Image (tube, rainbow, N blue to C red):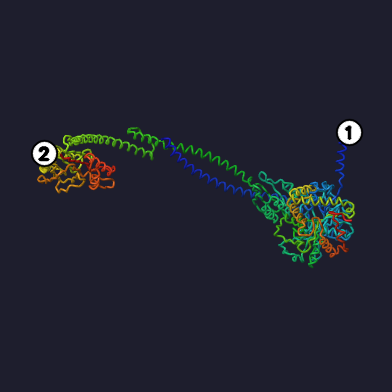
């Protein structure tokens, strides 16, 4: 019991506290996770951008240098009348002085120098560390339709070519920067040719390959047309464009990213490939029209957050474990007195009111409980003692009443058949008091050889006073009757005796009959009692005519009337008190005279004992266990005649 | 024992000898390796030529030596050429003959950007149109001239860069090649206006197989085997596209030609469509007389060709009964 109490209360408190804590932790963790994620995203975005910026800066150093060289020579050529034979020298100068430049051509329009013919394009290139010079242009190498010449001329702007492998076929990627130059005569501007600078892309590959972000993040460069210039997957370089790659990966999203890169935009987007989500940050690469992208798996970006979250979760789980332990301990400590109280209550229940209560030093609810418990213990003790006294007194009274009942029952004849020697008459009677002792009485006795006196009465009230009054009535009857032959005289005498000194104003309804056994005539007096039922030998069952007389014990001078009736052989008389007809059931329905007559009709041919018992059974059925409120008394006399 | 060894050696030698003695055909496609020639590669790789009883060597042209030169120099027995190029070459005195016409439809087209307000053929009037310097310019020029448009032809070597950078308003492209290069350079199909020559009555087929007339007379049987093997190769490629693409990509890698699956896959699909005869009243591999005359008339109209060649002299198929 003590264990169950502890389990239910302590564990319930722990459960509620813990649930709330878990809820609180979950909320906190979610908020932490959300904000950290956002911070990581922001930081990563910034890092990626700065990484891109620094990479672009490094790249632009070289691109800008190239652009500057071209610009200077463009100015030189446009503003000076150069000797055509000195042009080659310039190309040599450019390649020689700029280690990253691997080739330079200054190509002129057809017949620009008539003495040089249709094509004139001095060209110097570096091979194995040495400079070589040659002239480009022939029927087989019509440079006017080469992209490096035609495009800048057409768009009248410098142009960074698409990357290409050098003619040697080695894996050295090259791009060519071409700038158109003009001759001005007054307001007129005429195209003169194109300066080109070939740039090995080795340095770009080096710069971009060195970019590392997170575990497996990398950088890649795509050209204006989307061709991969650098990528960790070397098979993509120059073979795939970001668009053909998107087609192979079946990723329209990658295609859109490629288009955005191509448009020269800077962005930070996420991209899903298979089951992996990638983050791509991209920005244009100077004036080249190319775009630099930094790519890394999203999961790597959140790896530190995941680690912190795991540590946090472990800490929380351990913390919650400790919390559970401590709360359980505290709660158990706090409710310990309750266990003693429970034990004490059990001992009180067992009748031990003097058991020791736990000591409570604190001034709290437990102290209140202790005070109440002490008070209850004290009250219970005095109550039980009082109860003991009351119970013993009650038991004494009950025992006396039992004796009184035996005495009372001893007063009425209870041996049936009462007169086995007198075949003319048979009698059966019963008395069932509502309490231990009752106020009903019946009696029958022979006055002489010929006369049988039968009497049945009902004292007003119930219990001991009624029983005493009944005893007095019965004693008086027995002392008066043997000297008299007239019911009227007997009743008058009874009335007189009882009325005198009747301070408690009790009275008796009384029926007294004296039957002449030989003749079958019966004189009777009915002092306010229920009319008896006559069951004639012919089968009629009916009430006597109602006698209007008053009960005895009220007025000493009252004189009662006497009447006579004649029994034919086998006629029966059935006497009863109102305890029979007024027996109530749960619905407060009375047994009633109708039911009595009906019951008697069914057993009219039976012997008195059977008749009385049948009515008694019928009443029991009617009452159906409802409290018996009045004494139940019946008597049946049959006259068989001579 | 000794005799047995001799017999075995002789047998092995004989087998090897007879294998290596299969008549050899040297074939040169008219461009670098790509899915345009998938049928030949597949036939070689799958042993269809061997099954026919010939040994075929595929030799690609280089930047300096074109397929036609290889034919004239008799370095190659068979070459592939565009119909219109072949007529032009023949009219210049090279005695070549068409022994099979593989492509049955024109893949030539103009492509333009919708944002330059070119939505139909009419919109090309007054524009700059890119066209290959190396040839194949007869049909586009014929279309423009027949409509009396005034256009500026901008010669282009081979890339689509001029188009990409807005150096030209429109460009002559091959449906199976440059068009897809443009798509793979970032343009979406709905951003482009496609003008197919075949929609304007110029459905001149392209790829055909050619050899010198004398080669045909001398090696009729071998050529027949070559054409049969080639058709088998194309049929196999059509039914086993992934396998065919693997073969093509491997050859391209071996030849150090930049490529990717997306583009070659597109090209193979288009080539299979072009080889399909469709509603044309010809068998696979046959040259329709109408196509020949249409091509010749274009060449005569623009002055490239001044004397007519008869269809019979030009088209000499090697499938079926040899002519007398």
Which SS class for mark 2? Answer: helix
Looking at the image, can residue A570 be seen?
yes
Between A33 and A438, the residue placed more toward the observer is A438
Q: Is residue A269 above or below residue A155?
A: above
| Position in image of residue B171 (x %, y %) | 77, 60
Residue, far bottom:
B148
In the image, taking residue A632 as reference, residue A299 lies left or right, namely right
In the rendered view, tell whether residue A239 sits above or below residue A192.
above
Q: Dot 2 corresponds to which residue?
A: A480
Same chain assignment for discs 2 and 1 = no
User: Secondary structure under badge 1?
Assistant: helix
One can see residue A124 in this view: no
Near-viewer residue (A107 or B94): B94
Does residue A396 sit above or below A91 in this rendering? above
Q: Which mark is residue B192?
A: none
Q: Count how many numbered circles sit on residues in the image.
A: 2
User: Dot 2, how many residues are within 10 Å of its Cα: few (below 14), some (14-19), or many (20+)?
Assistant: some
Looking at this view, name the residue that lies furthest to the top. Answer: B1
- Report, in whole angstroms, how far the alpha carbon at label 2 lies from the one at label 1: 172 Å
Q: Nearer the viewer, residue B13 or A308?
A: B13
> What label sits on residue B3 in the rendered view?
1
Query: Toward the viewer: B109 or B45?
Result: B45
> Please, which chain is the residue tagged with disc 1 on?
B
Residue A144 relative to residue A424: left or right:
right
Tell whether A569 sits left or right of B281. Answer: left
- Is B28 placed left or right of B262 in the picture? right
């Amino acid at each position: 019991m003590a264990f169950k109490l502890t389990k239910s209360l302590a564990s319930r408190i722990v459960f509620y506290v813990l649930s709330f804590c878990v809820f609180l932790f979950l909320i906190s963790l979610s908020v932490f996770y959300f904000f950290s994620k956002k911070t990581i995203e922001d930081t990563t975005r910034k890092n990626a951008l700065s990484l891109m910026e620094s990479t672009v800066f490094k790249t632009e150093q070289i691109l800008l240098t190239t652009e500057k060289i071209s610009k200077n020579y463009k100015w030189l050529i446009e503003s000076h009348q150069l000797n055509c034979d000195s042009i080659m020298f310039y190309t040599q100068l450019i390649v020689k002085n700029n280690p990253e430049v691997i080739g330079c051509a200054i190509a002129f329009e057809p017949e620009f120098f008539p003495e040089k013919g249709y094509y004139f394009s001095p060209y110097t290139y570096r091979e194995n560390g040495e400079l070589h010079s040659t002239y480009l242009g022939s029927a087989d190498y019509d440079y006017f339709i080469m992209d490096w010449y035609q495009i800048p001329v057409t768009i009248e702007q410098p142009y960074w070519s698409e990357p290409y492998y050098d003619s040697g076929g080695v894996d050295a990627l090259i791009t060519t920067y071409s700038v158109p130059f003009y001759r001005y005569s007054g307001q007129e501007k005429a195209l003169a040719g194109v300066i080109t600078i070939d740039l090995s892309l080795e340095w770009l590959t080096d710069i971009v390959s060195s970019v590392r972000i997170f575990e497996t993040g990398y950088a890649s460069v795509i050209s204006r047309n989307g061709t991969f210039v650098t990528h960790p997957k070397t098979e993509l370089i120059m073979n795939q464009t970001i668009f053909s790659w998107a087609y192979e990966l079946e990723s329209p999203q990658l295609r859109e990213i490629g288009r955005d890169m191509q448009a020269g935009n800077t962005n930070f987007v996420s991209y899903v490939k298979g089951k992996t989500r990638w983050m791509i940050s991209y920005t244009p690469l100077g004036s080249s029209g190319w775009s630099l992208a930094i790519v890394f798996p999203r999961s790597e970006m959140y790896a530190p957050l995941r680690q912190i979250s795991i540590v946090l979760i472990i800490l929380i789980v351990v913390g919650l474990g400790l919390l559970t332990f401590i709360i359980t301990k505290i709660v158990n400590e706090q409710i310990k007195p309750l266990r003693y109280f429970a034990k004490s209550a059990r001992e009180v229940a067992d009748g031990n009111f003097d058991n020791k209560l736990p000591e409570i030093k604190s001034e709290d609810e437990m102290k209140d409980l202790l005070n109440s418990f002490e008070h209850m213990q004290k009250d219970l003790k005095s109550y039980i003692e009082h109860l003991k006294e009351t119970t013993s007194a009650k038991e004494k009274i009950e025992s006396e009443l039992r004796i009184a009942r035996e005495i009372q029952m001893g007063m009425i004849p209870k041996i049936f058949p009462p007169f086995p020697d007198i075949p003319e008459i048979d009698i059966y009677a019963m008395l069932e008091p509502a309490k231990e002792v009752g106020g009903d009485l019946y009696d029958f006795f022979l006055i002489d050889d010929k006369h049988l006196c039968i009497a049945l009465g009902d004292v007003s009230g119930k219990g001991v006073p009624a029983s005493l009054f009944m005893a007095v009535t019965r004693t008086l009857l027995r002392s008066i009757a043997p000297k008299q032959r007239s019911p009227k005289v007997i009743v008058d005498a009874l009335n007189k005796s009882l009325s005198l000194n009747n301070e408690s104003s009790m009275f008796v309804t009384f029926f007294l009959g004296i039957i002449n056994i030989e003749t079958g005539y019966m004189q009777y007096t009915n002092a306010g009692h229920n009319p008896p039922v006559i069951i004639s030998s012919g089968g009629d069952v009916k009430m006597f005519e109602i006698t209007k007389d008053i009960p005895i014990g009220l007025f000493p001078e009252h004189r009662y009337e006497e009447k006579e009736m004649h029994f034919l052989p086998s006629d029966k008389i059935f006497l009863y008190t109102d305890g029979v007809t007024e027996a109530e059931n749960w619905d407060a329905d009375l047994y009633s005279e109708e039911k009595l007559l009906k019951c008697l009709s069914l057993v009219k041919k039976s012997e008195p004992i059977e008749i009385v018992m049948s009515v008694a059974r019928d009443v029991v059925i009617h009452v159906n266990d409802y409290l018996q409120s009045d004494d139940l008394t019946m008597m049946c006399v049959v006259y068989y005649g001579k | 024992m000794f005799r047995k060894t001799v017999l075995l050696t002789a047998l092995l030698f004989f087998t090897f000898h007879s294998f290596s003695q299969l008549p050899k055909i040297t074939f040169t496609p008219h461009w670098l390796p790509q899915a345009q020639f998938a049928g030949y590669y597949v036939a070689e790789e799958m042993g269809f030529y061997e099954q026919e009883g010939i040994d075929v060597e595929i030799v690609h042209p280089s930047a300096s030596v074109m397929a036609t030169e290889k034919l004239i120099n008799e370095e190659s027995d068979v070459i592939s050429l565009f119909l219109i190029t072949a007529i032009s070459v023949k009219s210049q005195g090279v005695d070549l003959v068409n022994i099979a016409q593989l492509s049955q439809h024109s893949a030539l087209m103009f492509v333009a950007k919708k944002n330059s307000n070119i939505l139909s053929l009419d919109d090309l009037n007054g524009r700059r149109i890119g066209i290959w310097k190396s040839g194949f310019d007869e049909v586009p020029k014929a279309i423009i001239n027949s409509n009396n448009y005034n256009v500026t032809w901008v010669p282009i070597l081979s890339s689509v860069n001029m188009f990409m950078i807005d150096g030209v308003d429109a460009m002559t492209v091959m449906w199976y090649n440059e068009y897809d290069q443009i798509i793979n350079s970032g343009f979406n199909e709905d951003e482009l206006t496609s003008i197919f020559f075949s929609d304007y009555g110029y459905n001149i087929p392209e790829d055909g197989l050619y050899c010198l007339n004398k080669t045909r007379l001398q090696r009729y049987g071998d050529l027949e085997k070559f054409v049969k093997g080639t058709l088998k190769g194309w049929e196999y490629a059509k039914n086993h596209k992934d396998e065919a693409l693997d073969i093509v990509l491997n050859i391209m890698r071996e030849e150090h030609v930049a490529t990717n699956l997306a583009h070659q896959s597109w090209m193979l699909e288009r080539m299979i469509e072009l080889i399909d005869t469709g509603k044309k009243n010809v068998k696979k591999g046959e040259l329709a007389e109408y196509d020949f005359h249409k091509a010749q008339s274009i060449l005569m109209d623009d002055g490239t060709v001044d004397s007519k060649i008869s269809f019979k002299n030009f088209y000499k198929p090697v499938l079926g009964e040899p002519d007398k």
